[in-house]
Amino acid sequence: MPREWDAKTYDSLPLPHLQWGRRVLGGLDLTGKETVLDAGCGTGRDTAALLDLVPDGRVIAADGSKRMLEQLRVRLADRLDRVEVIEADLTQPLPLEGEVDAIVSVATFHWITDHASLFANLARTLRPGGRFVAECGGLGNVAQVSAAIEEVIGEQEKVWYFAGVEETRERLEQAGFTDIEVSLRPDPARFEPGEQLWSFLATVILGSHLDRMPEAEHEQFVKAVAARLPEPVVDYVRLEISATRA
């Protein structure tokens, strides 16, 4: 089951996702008439940028979180005539008519453990010759944060999947992609100590852990994790993907 998000707080934070989105969209070569799938669209920041890139096309915005999609509809209220909004599991067939011309995804795939099914499903959605560009947490991502969590609560249930380069390349090949480029990029994000760091950790990183705790314990847990970080930095490592549907 996809987890739900505090979408309004998410949108108010100084997210490193903004630069990740710019890098991903920079990997597209569009004429402006395409239909593009935003796989894991969240609150629609990248969806909005995609709409600017395809003024004569449309965007399919898919996500598993109702709250994120509600916030997307608010953000894009005056542009929904060119957006198809879908609540969906990205590892399952999407309710689309026909194939899309391109697929993008920002900061989503590390929440999905079955990358083989994910890539195969996306390949079925993409037309031959269509581009697929994405990024997510990769091998080594938030290692210091994970260590801090374990110091606070002991060994944790795995809530993320941070894949490496070779396994990702193999899964893309098996799914029917060519022209594959996969890399890892260390990309640490620094925050103001105190409220900004606590809010970011609680909203973006620790939500799946907080879902398993009584609400009365949330603040103490977030602050305990933050206190164990060597500095107010989230040690992101991004897995960057570029491929073409064969």
Image (cartoon, grey):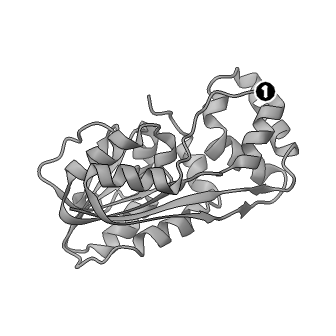
x then y, percent, for residue 48: 39, 65
Residue in the image at 61% along x and 55% along y? 12
When the figure is inspected, residue 131 is found, relative to residue 116, above or below; the finding is: below
Residue furthest to the top: 214
Q: Is residue 98 left or right of residue 246?
A: left
Residue pointed to by mark 1: 153
Mark 1 residue crowding within 10 angstroms, few (<14) / some (14–19) / many (20+):
few
**Quadrant of the image occupied by residue 50:** bottom left
> Would residue 150 be visible to someone looking at this image?
yes
Residue in the image at 84% along x and 55% along y? 193
x then y, percent, for residue 188: 70, 62
Element carrying mark 1:
helix
**Quadrant of the image occupied by residue 81:** bottom left
**Quadrant of the image occupied by residue 5:** top right
When the figure is inspected, residue 87 is found, relative to residue 37, above or below; the finding is: above
Residue in the image at 36% along x and 42% along y? 116
| Quarter of the figure with the C terminus | bottom left
Q: Is residue 110 left or right of residue 84?
A: right
> Would residue 220 be visible to someone looking at this image?
no
Of the pair 223 and 103, the residue shown nearer to us: 103
Of the pair 216 and 145, the residue shown nearer to us: 145
| Quarter of the figure with the N terminus | top left
When the figure is inspected, residue 33 is found, relative to residue 200, above or below; the finding is: below
> Which amino acid does the dot numbered 1 rest on?
Ile
x then y, percent, for residue 171: 37, 49
